């Protein structure tokens, strides 16, 4: 059989598998597993079977009379010994909370940064994208439910520890690492350690998240995260609870904190028929974004496709997306896009002053770029974003 040329995806997977023992952390004196607060040693004779090289102590938790209380996200799970949290990545082992989503991604890809979607952050570049299994929400419409609604123990995983994540990113000429597909909140420690090494190597870090996280861990992340796309799933607490098993207010707080901490931010709103397609609700959302200082940050209205537990619904009508976009523009938001609609003019970036196309997109690729030094090449108006 002749040699076949590997695709980028195949190359990454083979390289990840070949990484093998990198970061294994075995010691001749016993077993070590690395956590953000140091190393935890276990004698071979008392090593809990749940502890392996992909298990690190969680950073945010406290001990309570009802069990360990995770403080990473608003779920604040109370986890008894040998039980897991709702996200399926955290377990109470002998009175310590451990995360077993570390260095074991189940998805590794190279994507255009526009796919995240990020339209105003290093456009035209590739981003090295990784995810582990697990999620702290349970969206009925999840497009990645096969990996988000399960545990890292049940997925086919690759061995890719933080240093090797950065090595693979650099060797594939990617300008950034995207923590994506599921929700990086649930593999927080893996993101944190990878992001620190990335910063040391001039690689940018991107979060693609529902933003369902508590303030303290988020602010800690903001020291090393360069950009985020946050999925603002609706502007109704009731819909958040029924559609996503979450709440609205923590996500709004996340948006405010990211802006305050000066991370580049773009927002996605998936328009789901009969759930989030109410134009009055969309107007309230857009008015809130304007009042709270988000007029200069891109808003993406994304088209829903029938998936998972909402497979009985129809795809979002194009007219509904156009109406939502117009409401956002009328509210005063400057950069409003429509996603998942190939060929739509609403994927282009328009100058908010002269209305000329400053970035022309075909799918996820750039077909024309007219921004010079952060300004419109036609009228010299500022175009907000990270363009270098």
Image (spheres, rainbow, N blue to C red):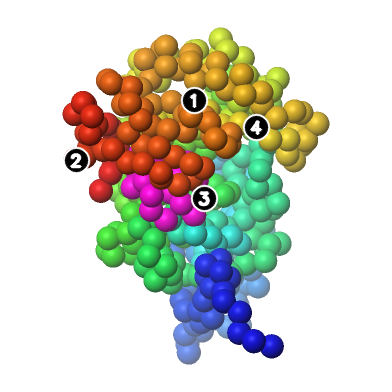
- Give the magenta range: 111-126
- Tell me whether circle 1 and circle 2 mark residues in contact (CB < 8 Å): no
Element assignment for label 4:
loop
Residue under circle 1? 249
Q: Of marks 1 and 4, which one's residue comes earlier in the chain?
A: 1
Q: Of marks 1 and 2, which one's residue comes earlier in the chain?
A: 1
Residue under circle 2? 373
Residue 378: which quarter of the image? top left
Q: Main secondary structure of the magenta part?
A: loop
Q: Which mark is residue 180?
A: 3
Q: CA distance from mark 3 to mark 4?
A: 18 Å
**Nearer the observer, 25 or 288:** 288
Element assignment for label 1:
helix
* Residue in view at x 56 percent, y 74 percent: 6
Q: Of marks 3 and 2, which one's residue comes earlier in the chain?
A: 3
* Residue in view at x 75 percent, y 40 percent: 308
Residue 318 forms part of the magenta stretch: no
Q: Which mark is residue 304?
A: 4
- 55 relative position to 149: left or right: left
In the rendered image of this protein, does residue 182 appear above or below residue 203? Answer: above
């Amino acid at each position: 059989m002749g040699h076949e040329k590997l695709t980028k995806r195949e190359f990454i997977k083979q390289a990840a598998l070949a990484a093998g023992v990198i970061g294994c952390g075995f010691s001749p004196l016993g077993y070590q597993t690395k956590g953000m607060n140091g190393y935890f040693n276990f004698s071979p004779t008392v090593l809990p079977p749940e502890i392996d090289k992909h298990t690190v102590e969680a950073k945010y938790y406290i001990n309570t009379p009802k069990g360990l209380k995770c403080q990473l996200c608003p779920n604040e799970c109370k986890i008894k010994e040998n039980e897991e949290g709702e996200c399926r990545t955290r377990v109470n082992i002998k009175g310590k909370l451990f995360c077993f989503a570390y260095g074991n991604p189940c998805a590794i890809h190279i994507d255009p940064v526009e796919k995240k979607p990020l339209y105003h952050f290093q456009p035209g570049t590739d981003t090295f994208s990784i995810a582990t299994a697990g999620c702290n929400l349970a969206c009925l419409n999840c497009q990645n439910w096969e990996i988000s609604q399960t545990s890292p123990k049940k997925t086919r995983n690759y061995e890719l520890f933080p240093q090797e994540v950065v090595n693979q990113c650099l060797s594939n000429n990617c300008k950034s690492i995207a923590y994506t597909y599921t929700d990086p909140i649930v593999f927080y420690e893996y993101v944190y350690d990878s992001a620190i090494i990335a910063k040391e190597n001039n690689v940018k870090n991107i979060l693609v998240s529902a933003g369902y996280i508590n303030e303290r861990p988020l602010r800690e992340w903001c020291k090393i995260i360069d950009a985020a796309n946050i999925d603002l799933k609706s502007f109704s607490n009731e819909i958040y609870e029924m559609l996503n098993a979450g709440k609205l207010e923590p996500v709004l707080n996340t948006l405010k904190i990211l802006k305050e901490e000066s991370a580049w931010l773009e927002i996605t709103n998936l328009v789901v028929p009969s759930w989030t397609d109410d134009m009055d609700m969309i107007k309230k959302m857009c008015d809130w974004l304007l009042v709270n200082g988000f007029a200069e940050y891109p808003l993406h209205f994304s088209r829903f496709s029938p998936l998972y537990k909402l497979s009985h619904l129809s795809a979002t009508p194009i007219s509904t997306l156009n109406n939502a976009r117009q409401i956002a523009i009328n509210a005063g938001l400057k950069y409003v896009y429509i996603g998942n609609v190939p060929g739509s003019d609403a994927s282009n970036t328009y100058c908010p002053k002269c209305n000329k196309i400053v970035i022309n997109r075909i799918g996820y690729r750039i077909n024309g770029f007219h921004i010079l030094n952060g300004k419109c090449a036609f009228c010299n108006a500022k175009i907000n974003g990270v363009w270098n």
